């Protein structure tokens, strides 16, 4: 019996060929197992996926108005706060201008 040299490199084509054969065989076995163990037919699976997609679309449609209403409420609150601050600044400027006119006689 002839001894094999452990330092001898295996040609790349042999390794690549074995890999491709294993990948192909694994794919075929996986496909057969998927068909064998599938809980329902392809038509039923497609129907279920379609129903779930429609449910998600309906739910997201219902959530959109809630988000829009919340955003509008925040914008409205911000605008009210902005108007309130403007009125406060305007009153303060009016008072300061009146005081400066009285004290310094500016504009008389």
Image (cartoon, grey):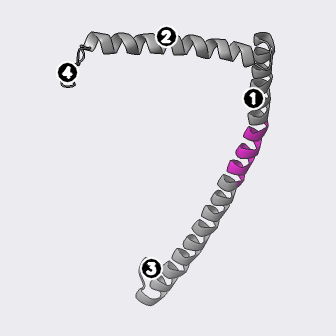
Label 2 vs label 3, nearer the camera: 2
Task: Provide the secondary structure element on which disc 1 rests.
Answer: helix
Label 1 vs label 4, nearer the camera: 4
| Mark 2–mark 3 distance (CA, rounded to whole Å) | 98 Å
Mark 1 or mark 4: whose residue is earlier in sequence? 4
| Residue segment shown in magenta | 62-73
Mark 4 or mark 2: whose residue is earlier in sequence? 4
The residue pinned by badge 3 equals: 108
Label 3 vs label 4, nearer the camera: 4
Label 1 vs label 2, nearer the camera: 2
| Mark 1–mark 2 distance (CA, rounded to whole Å) | 39 Å
| Mark 1–mark 4 distance (CA, rounded to whole Å) | 65 Å
**Magenta region includes residue 64:** yes
**Number of residues whose C-alpha sits closer than 10 Å to that of mark 2, classed few (under 14), some (14–19) or many (20 or more):** few
Residue 1 in picture, x, y percent from top left: 26, 14
Mark 3 or mark 1: whose residue is earlier in sequence? 1
Q: Quick one: quadrant of the C terminus?
A: bottom left
* Residue at 59% from the left image edge and 14% from the top image edge: 29
Contact (CB < 8 A) between labels 3 and 4?
no
Number of the label disc, if any, that sits on residue 5: 4
Q: Is residue 59 positioned above or below 48 on the image? A: below
Mark 3 or mark 4: whose residue is earlier in sequence? 4
| Mark 3–mark 1 distance (CA, rounded to whole Å) | 69 Å
């Amino acid at each position: 019996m002839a001894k094999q040299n452990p330092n001898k490199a295996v040609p790349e084509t042999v390794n690549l060929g074995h890999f491709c054969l294993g990948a192909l065989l694994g794919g075929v076995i996986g496909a057969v197992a998927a068909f064998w163990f599938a809980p329902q037919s392809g038509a039923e699976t497609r129907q279920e996926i379609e129903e779930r997609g429609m449910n998600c679309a309906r739910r997201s449609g219902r959530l959109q108005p809630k988000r829009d209403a919340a955003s509008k409420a925040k914008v409205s609150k911000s605008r009210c706060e902005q108007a309130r601050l403007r009125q406060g600044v305007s009153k303060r400027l009016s008072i300061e201008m009146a005081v400066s006119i009285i004290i310094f006689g500016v504009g008389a």
